[in-house]
Amino acid sequence: MSSLVLDRIGQLVTNDPGVGDGSPLGQLHDAAVVLDHGRVQWVGPAEGAPAADERVDAGGRCVLPGFVDSHSHLVFAGDRTTEFEARMTGQPYTAGGIRTTVAATQAATNDELAATLDRHLEEMRRQGTTTVEVKSGYGLTTADEARALRIAAQRTSETSFLGAHVVPAEYVDDPAGYVELVTGEMLAACAPHARWVDVFCEQGAFDADQARTVLAAGAEHGLGARVHGNQLGPGPGVQVAVETGAASVDHCTHLSATDVEALAGSSTVATLLPGVEFSTRSPYPPARALLDAGATVALASDCNPGSSYTSSIPLCIALAVREMHMSPAEALWAATAGGAAALRRTDVGTLRPGARADVILLDAPSYVHLAYRPGVPLVHQVWLGGNPHTVSQRGFGPLGS
Ligand SMILES: [Zn+2]
């Protein structure tokens, strides 16, 4: 693989607080980055950049680490347009939407599931996402959960077993029997294809004891813990996540002061998913309280056909700034380094030398434009492990014209 120097960068975000302005974003101006053998080889002022086989002139634009989307549900079939339209027009909405997707997913062929997954992954890459976590959870039988994870694991190393997504219809009278299935035969079939175990700890899904049982069983198979918690109302999700040392607790929409304090004093990342609140017209999570208390915050899409059918991290950043009062810098950090922390990764979400060469070139002078220009496709080019993934076919005009 040939080396590449990306120079004349107006604003370079490294997420390395040891360089540049000393802020968490580690910003440099008039900078260059050299990519070689799939890694970031060198970062520094443009005039000091070493020679490389190829050169890309950023023309004063902004360069960022690729987005790390640490929460998605992309192995699914079917469509829930009607449900969304009903919700948006105020018609009565009944829960159980997940089961609609489960039925469609179970009925789909492997090729159909793989094609849908590939289409959404491509959509994500075009918008700057270079690392993505994918969950199962729409199979809910041993065979269907295992095939979802097999398909996902062929495309990403960040796969989560979410058999404990919802109690399927055939177990509504025997939830304990379903937990037994999830932690027994289903887990054994799924663990070889998963890095993580996840559980939906919420009223109407799984309670604290069931969640602990699921996470402990996953740990015995070497799976790290993640939790869906405190989405629909206050609950034990955050406490369970913190006490089990989960890498992340996701949603965090309804938090008590005790929850915020527990997160701030732990290594569990609070992953906020504002696409959900946007798409379900719900109150947003208390990002400010979490940040002010010192908790680590990540932003992710939760891309799924029911509650958040967006694959766009730039949209999530814009919502975090506009609706959750995160600063543009906090939102960008949360969608890159924060996502990496939620996946316990140190090789992505940063552009320090040695990191994976996952890079975004924006057609904008500053990352602030991600929130300032919502809905505008500003991602011009993406490099995945140093390989160019062309997003825009149009050339650059002069910046500012
Ligand atoms: Zn989710």
Image (tube, rainbow, N blue to C red):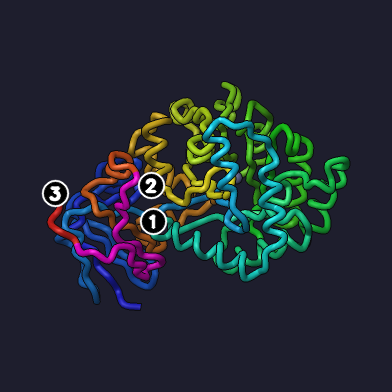
Q: Does residue 395 appear in this view?
A: yes
Secondary structure category for the residue under label 1: loop
Q: How many marks are shown on the rendered structure?
A: 3
The residue carrying mark 3 is 400
Residue drawn at point x = 71 percent, y = 47 percent: 99
Which residue range is magenta in the image? 375-395
Say which quarter of the image contains residue 134: bottom right
Q: Does residue 190 appear in this view?
A: no
Q: CA distance from mark 3 to mark 2?
A: 21 Å
- Per the rendering, the mark at residue 314 is 2
For this orientation, the residue located farthest to the top is 257
Circle 1 crowding by C-alpha within 10 Å: few under 14, some 14–19, many from 20: many
Answer whether labels 2 and 1 touch (C-beta < 8 Å): yes
Say if disc 3 is inside 8 Å of ligand 1.
Answer: no
State the residue in front, 372 or 116.
116
User: Given the image, on which type of amino acid does mark 1 rest?
Assistant: Gly
Question: Reading the chain from its start, which is encountered first: label 3 or label 2?
Answer: 2
Secondary structure category for the residue under label 2: helix
Say which quarter of the image contains residue 78: bottom right
Ligand 1 visible in quadrant? top right
- Per the rendering, the mark at residue 128 is 1
Q: CA distance from mark 2 to mark 1?
A: 8 Å
State the residue in front, 95 or 290.
95
Q: Does 298 sit left or right of 229 as displayed?
A: left
User: Given the image, on which type of amino acid does mark 3 rest?
Assistant: Gly
Residue drawn at point x = 87 percent, y = 40 percent: 173
User: Given the image, on which type of amino acid does mark 2 rest?
Assistant: Pro
Q: In the rendering, at what x and y percent does residue 54 appear?
A: 24, 74
Question: Reading the chain from its start, which is encountered first: label 2 or label 1?
Answer: 1
Q: CA distance from mark 3 to mark 1?
A: 22 Å
